[in-house]
Image: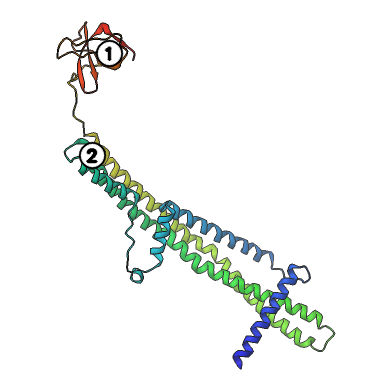
Amino acid sequence: MDNFKKTLSDASTFVSRAVQFTEERLGKAERTELDPHFVALEQKTDSCKGYTEKIKANCEAVLVPNPAARAESLFFDNVPVDKIGIKNERLTNSEYLGTDMVEAGNEFGVGTPYGSALIRVGQTQSRLGEVEKEYIRNGNEGMIAPLQRFLDGEMKNISRERKVLENKRLDLDACKNKVRKARHLATQPQSENELRICQAEFDRQAEITKLLMEGLAQTQTNHLRHLKDFVQAQVKYYDEAHCVMQELHRELSGLTPPSTSPLPAHNTTLMRGQALLDYDAKGPDELSLMAHEVLNVYDREPRDEDFLLAERGQKTGSVPRAYIKIIS
C-alpha cells in the first residue's frame, strides 16, 4: 500500500512539473529566475564542460589519428581483459611498415646494399612504433584519463544537482500558482505551507549547486598538472624519436653503393653533354655515341685535349671532345 501511495505521489509530482514546464514555455506561467551570479556560474560550468570534452577528444586524435584504431583502443581501455579474453595487440603504422621492410630486405638479399638498408630502416621503424606506444600510454595516463574522470565525476555530479534544482524550481513555481489560485479558498493555509517547504528545498538545493560550481575553479590546478604531463610525454616522445632517426641517418650515410663504372677517383668535374654526331668506338676503352643523346661527361686528369670520359648507364669510356656539346 505504501509503495502504491508513493507511486501515485511520484506520478502527481511528475504531472505537476510537466504542466508547469509547458505553461512556462507557452508564456502562461511565471518562473522563478536565478540570481545573476548563479547564472554566470552556470555559463562558466557549461563552458568548462564543453572545452574539456573538446580538448580530451582532440588529445585522443593527436595520440591515435586513425578513428578506427582510436575506437579499438577505447574499447580495450574500457573493457577488462579477463572479460573478453583477448588483448589489444594492434601494431602501430610504424611497426607495420617496419615488418614489411624487414621481410622485403630479407627477400632482396641481406648482402645487397638495398636489402641491408631496408632491414636496418625496418628495424628502426619498429623501434619508433614502440616509442609511439609508450607516448600513447603516457599521454593517455597524463591527460586523457584524468579529464575523463573529471567529466564522469565532478562534472556529472554537478549536472545531476542542476537537474534536481530545476525540478525543485518547477515544484516551487507550481506551488506559487497553486497559492494564487487558492487565495480565496479554504485550502490557502495548506498551499502556503507547501510553498514555504518548496521554497526552503529550492534555496537549499541552489546553495548546494552553487558551491559545487564554484569549486570548479579549483580543478584548474589539477588540469594544469595534467597539461604539463601531456607536454612532458610529447617532449620525451619527440626526443627519443629524434635520437632513433639520427642514429639511422648516420648509419645510412655510411652505406656507399658500389661504383658501377671506373670513374676517376679525384679531380673530376661532372658535366652534361650532348652528342653532336654518331660515333663508333675505336677500341674497348672508348664509348660509342648516338647523335643528340645526352650523357654525363668528365674531364680527365691530367686533362686530355682530345677526349672526354663519358658515362651512359653502367658503361664508361672515352669519347672525342669534338663530338660533344657541353649543355650544363
Q: Is residue 318 left or right of residue 146?
A: left
10 Å crowding of disc 1: few (<14), some (14-19), many (20+)? few
Q: Which residue is mark 1?
A: 290
Instruction: Find residue 113 and report its image quarter.
Output: top left
Task: For the C terminus, give its image quadrant.
Answer: top left
| Residue at x 32%, y 64% (from the top left corner) | 87
Residue 147, numbered circle: none
State the residue at coordinates (33%, 71%).
82
Q: Are marks 2 and 1 in contact (CB under 8 Å)?
A: no
Alpha carbon distance from label 2 to label 1: 37 Å
Read off the residue under disc 2: 117
Q: Position of residue 69 (x, y in %)?
A: 40, 56
- Indicate left or right for 80 with 172 as reference: left
Q: Residue furthest bottom?
A: 1
> Does residue 3 sit above or below 58 in this rendering?
below
Say what secondary structure mark 1 lies in: loop
- Residues 80 and 112: in front is 112
Q: Residue at x 26, y 42 (%)?
A: 121
Question: Could you tell whether 281 is left or right of 246 in the image?
Answer: left
